[in-house]
């Protein structure tokens, strides 16, 4: 089958690949319909690695996918041929200690699409564990189905924050993940979510949602003071990974509030610990997600969360390389680029 292959750093090709695709008893075979391009895919393309994960051999990219079930394994009872589905790209060892604790996202044995050496899903078909394949209700399109993956990260962040009804949150960074976090925080009970970013077109896009106030960095202090009568926000979500932003993490949090670290700095960054201690802030971290797909799908199906305004452009599979080069450009008005398979 033809796949989008990252041959090495900086070089993509659309070419035939020979991948094992035997269907196990607990697996389903899926014809891929839509795949979103993620920042991590782009980072492997431009840098050839993310932290300890290094591309040493050609790897198929893509991990944010929806599709249609074409074959089910012998023991699969809850999915049928023809079901529209989306897939969770990380499959843990079900017998691992992490999986038994419900923390399967941090199972050291997890295999995750398009994380070296595991191939991704930018190809016509995949074989995947049925337990990590989720049926899409009619109200959720394939395009939205391929947004479940990044939205699950937002929901993981909102869950880790332990939001209470009526909380006010601040999201630092309006990249795709910052936007997902903002919408998840709102869905999770925040009365208001303030989002900030230096790129103004991104603020226009996320600020169009009810309940979200999008302001440039120099206006954050005034808005936080206005909304919270000078007390500070209940939750600060860090979604930039930028050292300068992380240095000021405690600035807008209320005493006793929470900071959630979502962004991943490329290099280690200094943290002003005393500024966090002085407000006795609770610090939470996020790595991917666990048990968030059903929640993401339920929020989309109910109409409570609509991510379609965040899909900027859709490219046919044959133009996958052009789609990736567009993603590398990082246009300020681009949020999510998707690729559809024939
Ligand atoms: Zn992703």
Image: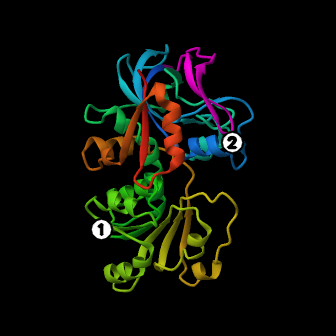
User: Is-magenta flag for residue 13?
Assistant: yes
Q: Position of residue 163 (x, y in %)?
A: 40, 64
Part of the protein shown in magenta: 1-28
Query: Circle 2 sits on which residue?
Result: 48
Would residue 188 be seen by someone viewing this image from the given angle?
no
Query: Circle 1 sits on which residue?
Result: 191
Whether residue 287 is situated above or below residue 3 in the rendered picture: below
> Which residue lies at the image location 35% right of the left edge and 39% below the top edge?
144
Would residue 140 be seen by someone viewing this image from the given angle?
yes
Question: Circle 2 — which element?
Answer: loop
Labels 1 & 2 near each other (Cβ < 8 A): no
- Crowding near pointer 1: few (<14 within 10 Å), some, many (20+)? some
- Quadrant including the C terminus: top left
Q: Where is residue 175 in the image (x, y as percent from the top left)?
A: 46, 56
Using the numbered discs, state the Cα–Cα distance from disc 1 to disc 2 in whole angstroms. 41 Å
Taking the image as shown, residue 141 lies to the left or right of residue 87, namely left
Whether residue 330 is situated above or below residue 11 in the rendered picture: below
- Crowding near pointer 2: few (<14 within 10 Å), some, many (20+)? many
The outermost residue toward the right is: 56
> Which residue lies at the image location 29% right of the left edge and 33% below the top edge?
137
Whether residue 229 is situated above or below residue 16 in the rendered picture: below
> Which residue lies at the image location 47% right of the left edge and 25% below the top edge?
318
Q: In this orientation, which residue lies closer to the viewer: 329 or 25?
A: 329
Taking the image as shown, residue 9 lies to the left or right of residue 255, namely right
- Quadrant assignment, res 56: top right
Number of marks present in the image shown: 2
């Amino acid at each position: 089958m033809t796949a989008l292959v990252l041959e090495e750093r900086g070089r993509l090709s659309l070419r035939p690949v020979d991948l094992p695709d035997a269907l196990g008893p607990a697996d389903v075979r899926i014809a891929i319909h839509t795949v979103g391009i993620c920042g991590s895919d782009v980072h492997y393309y431009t840098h050839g690695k993310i932290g300890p994960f290094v591309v040493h051999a050609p790897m198929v990219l893509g991990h944010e996918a929806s599709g249609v079930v074409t074959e089910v394994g012998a023991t699969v009872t809850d999915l049928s041929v023809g079901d529209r589905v989306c897939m969770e790209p990380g499959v843990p060892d079900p017998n691992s200690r992490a999986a038994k604790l419900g923390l399967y996202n941090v199972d050291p044995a997890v295999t995750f699409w398009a994380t070296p050496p595991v191939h991704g899903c930018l190809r016509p078909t995949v074989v995947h564990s049925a337990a990590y394949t989720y049926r899409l209700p009619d109200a959720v399109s394939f395009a939205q189905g391929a947004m479940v993956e990044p939205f699950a990260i937002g929901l993981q962040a909102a869950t880790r924050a332990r939001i209470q009804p009526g909380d006010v949150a601040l999201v630092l960074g309006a990249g795709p993940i910052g936007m997902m976090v903002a919408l998840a925080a709102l869905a999770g009970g925040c009365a208001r979510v303030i989002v900030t970013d230096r790129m103004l077109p991104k603020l226009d896009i996320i600020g169009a949602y009810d309940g979200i106030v999008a302001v440039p960095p120099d206006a954050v202090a005034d808005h936080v003071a206005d909304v919270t009568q000078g007390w500070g926000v209940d939750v600060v979500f860090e979604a930039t990974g930028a050292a300068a932003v992380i240095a000021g993490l405690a600035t807008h949090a209320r005493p006793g509030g929470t900071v959630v670290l979502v962004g991943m700095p490329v290099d280690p960054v200094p943290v002003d610990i005393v500024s966090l201690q002085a407000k006795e802030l609770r610090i939470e971290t996020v790595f991917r997600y666990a048990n968030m797909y059903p929640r993401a799908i339920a929020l989309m199906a109910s109409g409570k969360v609509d991510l379609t305004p965040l899909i900027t452009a859709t490219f046919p599979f044959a133009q996958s390389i052009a789609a990736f080069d567009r993603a590398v450009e990082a246009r300020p008005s681009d949020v999510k680029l998707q690729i559809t398979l024939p």
